[in-house]
Image: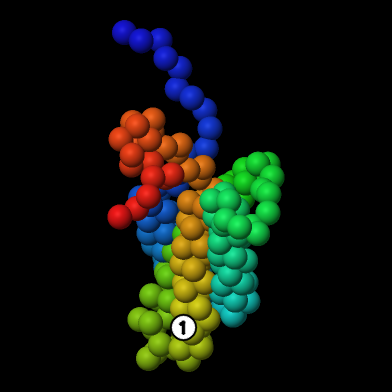
Amino acid sequence: MTDEVPRGGLRPTRPATLVVAAVVTAGLSWLFIRHYFGDIPNVNWLAGVSMATLAVVEGIAAHNTRTRIEQRPRAGRLNPLLVARFAVLAKASSLAGAIFAGAYGGIAAWALSERERLTVAAQTLAPAIAGVVGGLALVAAALLLERACRVPKPPDEDDHENGNGPSSPRR
């Protein structure tokens, strides 16, 4: 029996966690909007556009971070604390994006089912779909940013001894 204590730290986001968050939120939002639609404010485009904008910003950050971690020419130095902050931002954004995508997915499902009967449901459908797309874009960009923050594994010594290392000529 070993007395190893599990190391703390930031673990990669599990896709299953994001799917469960989105599905549960979708179900809850569909139930909520079905019963209380008259009591909530109108669904607008702001959330979808905001999440899409944040997705673009995180996508650019992911590209820049990956470029700097791989130490490409003219990429510049990278502050390790910034990478840690980006990793935390990415984890939070992926979960938030999944929750918002699920919430707007539930609203979109309700609006799709009621659009023939209620005019307001037909008006709600497009902004709800924009919310779903914005949420999914945020999840994708956040996962890219999280992946970009990973430090590459050092090459194995065996690879260098066998001539397969990064300094060996490629054929």
User: Picture coordinates of residue 168 (x, y %)?
Assistant: 39, 45
In-image side of 46 versus 155 (left or right): right
Q: Amino acid at mark 1?
A: Leu
User: Picture coordinates of residue 27 (x, y %)?
Assistant: 39, 62
Q: Quadrant of the N terminus?
A: top left
Quick check: 120 above or below 22?
below
Residue closer to the observer: 144 or 14: 144
Residue closer to the observer: 94 or 75: 75
Residue, x 53% and y 32% (percent of image)? 9
Identify the residue position indicated by label 1 in the image: 125
Q: Quadrant of the C terminus?
A: bottom left
Question: Can the viewer see residue 90 in this picture?
Answer: no
Few, some or many residues within 10 Å of mark 1 (<14, 14–19, 20+): many
Quick check: 57 above or below 45?
above
Residue, x 64% and y 57% (percent of image)? 75
Give the structural element (helix, strand or loop) at label 1.
helix
User: Picture coordinates of residue 125 (x, y %)?
Assistant: 46, 83
Total numbered circles? 1
